[in-house]
Amino acid sequence: MRNTPSTLRYWLLSAAAVVLDQISKYAVLARFEDFERLPVVSGFFDLTLVYNTGAAFSFLASAGGWQKYFFVALAAVISVWLVRAVRKGEFGALGSWGAAMVVGGALGNVIDRFVHGKVVDFLLFYGETWSYPAFNVADSFICVGAALLVLDSFTHKKHGRPSENTQKEAS
């Protein structure tokens, strides 16, 4: 079980996700004051600088500080599991690309938790009566990657596990 040229491309995508995420956050931190907003598409999309001590949708954001370590540990466990699964060939191509995206996004947010103590968010979509919570490039990689993992679970047959039809035909 080692990295091969065929899996290297996935880790390059993970690295690209981390680099793009950190560069974008650095640019926002250098340009914006906390909570400052810059309209990009008036009435729909702004750049802003906000922080999240929790997870998606500020889950556990006001938990008192322990959540930083919990989310770092959770990201580490999930990333190790995904890396192992890709290296063992447990996913199809969609799942492997998705796993690489999740790993890269998770690492981008873990870097924030170590450097800033919280995650830097800056992409804000909204309308007259609604607003989607601000997020970042790492979050985008995680969401798209998770969607690819779900799609892969429907399209990729795992080796060594006979399907229900094969089991029924054998009986």
Image (tube, grey):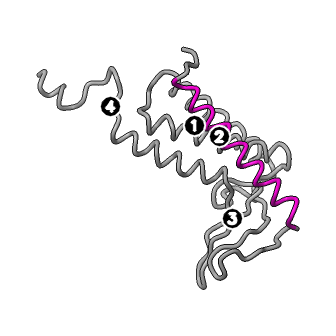
Q: Residues within 10 Å of mark 4 (few under 14, many from 20)?
A: some
Residue 131 place in picture, x, y as percent: 62, 74
Quadrant that contains the C terminus: top left
Residue 14, quarter of the rendered image: top right
Q: Which amino acid does label 2 sit on?
A: Gly
Q: In this view, does 116 lie to the left or right of 2?
A: right
The stretch of residues the image draws in magenta is: 6-32
* Mark 1 / mark 4, whichever is N-terminal: 1
* Mark 3 / mark 1, whichever is N-terminal: 1
Q: Residue 104 carries which label?
A: 2
Q: Is residue 141 left or right of residue 155?
A: right
The residue beneath circle 4 is 157
CB contact under 8 Å: marks 2 and 1: yes
The residue beneath circle 1 is 100
Between label 4 and label 3, give the one nearer the viewer: 3
Q: What residue type is labelled 3?
A: Leu
Task: Using the image, determine if residue 135 lies above or below residue 152.
Answer: below
Residue 130 place in picture, x, y as percent: 59, 78
CB contact under 8 Å: marks 1 and 4: no
**Residue drawn where x is 71% and y is 49% of the image:** 21
